[in-house]
Image (cartoon, helix red, strand yellow):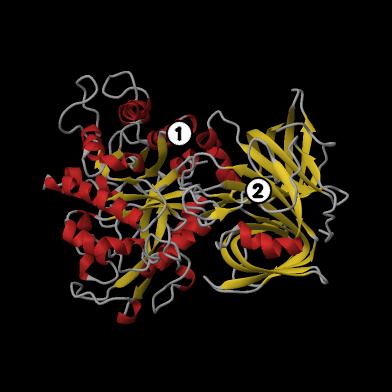
Amino acid sequence: MKTKRFVMSALALASGAMLAGCGGDGAKSDGGSGTSYSPRTYMLAAGSGQLSAGTDGAIRTLTLKNVESDVLWYVGGQSLEVGKSPVKDYTGSIWRDAYGGVDPNATVQFQLPGGGMEGIYAALSKPAYDEKTGTMTFQAQLQNDTLDQDAGAALAFDNVTVKVLNNLADDKEVAEYTQYASKAALQLTATAGQYKVVLSQAGEDMFLVDNAPGMYSEARPVSYFLPQWSYAYGETAPTATLFGTTAKGAPKLYAMKLSNPAYDADTDEISYTATLQGSNAGALEAVDDAVLSIAAGRFTRFPIPGKGTAYQAFGHGYNPSQANDTYIYFGSDIARKQAGSLWGKQSYLSQSCGSDCRDDLKTIKSMGINLIRLYDWDTRNDHSQFLDYANSLNIKVVVPLSNWISTQGSVVWNRDVGAYFSSRNFGNKAGTDWHPAVAGVIISNELDFSGYPGNYNTAIGLVARFIEEADKRKFSKSVPVGMPVTFVPRGEPYLEGRNMPGWNQFNRLLTDPRTAKYRDRLMLAPQTYNNENYLLRDAESTGQGWIPATYKQFGVPILFTEIGYSRAKPDYTANYVQRQLKGVLEYQKSHPGQILGVAHFQFDDKVWKQTSNDTDTEGAFGAFHHGDVVRTLQTVRADYDFTNDEAKTFGSLTIDKLVKTSVYDPVVEAYK
């Protein structure tokens, strides 16, 4: 795309809003922190720019060239307020007054040479402007990007739009969603006052961003976001602003409410039904280098639909009863760095996996899966590589606290729980919030079924202790916590004398004095092998499905942490599993607040239980069977980060061939 210089002197308004004066910045209190922040969002345009190279966490230099002499600003809301200010004032007194000493967050949209529209999300600081050369620089702390290439490399780009968000201290995790497109047009419809907004040559990725001092962000595919529309907004059309430049180079800003989102990946086109806010000040014109900002609604970290798998895919040689004899299998922790030859595309061991790296996460992605449920986690291991790779594939992860720590009690919890929030575990690189791949946390697995009846009660205490620690560290509150339980009736009945599976366990979790105050932070985590009819239409001959009855009873969202059926069962059919998964996901589309997702049990057969003719019911759930060993990696002391006195040997990691079972196609079909 040819580089063009924007003309900022002409300001076209697309609402009946008042044009505010440029004196002062209209700062206002954030309502509690004692710091005054400007309510204004600023838009800067430049002909070209570059971002210096850097490593994770490094401060980079963002340089803008041919910057227009004015910046456009607006204050969102029902009545849009718009104005402009000289760039030299913005980088000086306005910057000092607007952000209260807190570096603001910004999205930067640009055109790569020979490529499409891309963007970065960064915290900006130290603005400097050379009026003679029209050059502007910032220090930039990169938070996220839509790039396919190495984000650490130096970048040069054209047609730059910088959107600097206002600072706002609140408890909302995401302030808005930002989409980019080369062009945007408003088309008349048959309904008076309504238009069709069409974004052409749209970037396939978009940003979910927060105002500073918040730092949360995600770069998600548009195809990932739009299915969440009904969950986020319900029947309420969100407000939005569309910014771009006309064919004559004049900036144009439309304020609108949006509904009926649609995305055509084949044509790179996104469309909405729009109702303009206020009276239109001027002719409707198409705009180039469009930035569409949509106010955030209800937010969930879970993908919708939540198409998941249970994952613990160690190969031949692994057996949980003997796992702690070796360093490599100690704790049955598949997400650790040392298992990268299985879940990833490289070995983190002294021995390389070469061309035999199994790359399970890529296989999982190819199956249409966007959610992984894990079982075991040792905080002494480094898991950041697993979470980073999952995040790069837009796969969310439900991370676990395993049964061992769940049964230990407060002395061990107080000593060890803090480690889960490090950057090697559930935390982001800065350790200030959750890793962006983390969707939820599960504590223990089926302790309600254990031989010691007090285990489940003890683990409820860990749920409370874990959430308490997350709040102490000021991690965001959007990550729900659950306890996977067996799908059998236990204890006192509920619902007119009928005791539905899991209800007693759920009731104990939700009403326990330790966890009751965190009810809105919890999720229900049943593990079921029941069929679609039982789950959706007729459970226990009640004439209503287990899902709607359970949500009606508790009002807490449900994540099926295991769902499937064993191939060894005499009544197994591939259609049984497909209908299970597809039925629940279709229900989720209609009731997105009730279902967080399903985790098919499981990605692979339990290798220590599998048989060639599926005679062991526990070893025949997987979409894959473990075949021949293709490579064995002998591990050495240097492969591990800590000394383990319990392990007898370092052990070897086997990479085996995964062979599709009859469950593979039903899972893929259900997840299309």
Q: Residue at x 58, y 65 (%)?
A: 142
- Mark identifier at residue 506: none
Task: Please tell me how crowded label 1 is: few (under 14), some (14-19), or many (20+) other residues with Cα within 10 Å.
Answer: many
* Outermost residue toward the front in this view: 23
Toward the viewer: 290 or 441?
290
Badge 2 is on which residue?
A: 179
Which one is earlier in the sequence, the residue at label 1 or at label 2?
2
Q: Is residue 592 above or below residue 193?
A: below
Nearer the observer, 669 or 506: 506
Vertical relation: 499 (above or below) 49: above
Left or right: 210 with respect to 154? left
Snapshot quadrant of residue 407: bottom left
Horizontal and vertical percent for residue 21? 75, 48
Mark 1: amino acid: Gln
Q: Which residue is tagged 1?
A: 588
* Element carrying mark 2: strand
Q: Position of residue 334 (x, y in %)?
A: 34, 61
What secondary structure is marked by label 1? Answer: helix
Q: Quadrant of the N terminus?
A: bottom right
- Depth check: give the residue in front, 569 or 532: 532
Left or right of 456? Residue 134 is right
Q: Position of residue 61 (x, y in %)?
A: 65, 72
Q: How many marks?
A: 2
Amino acid type for the residue under numbered disc 2:
Gln
Q: Is residue 112 visible to the viewer in this orientation of the structure?
A: no
When the figure is inspected, residue 550 is found, relative to residue 520, above or below; the finding is above
The answer to whether residue 51 shows anywhere in this view is yes
**Where residue 672 sits in the image (x, y, percent)?**
52, 41
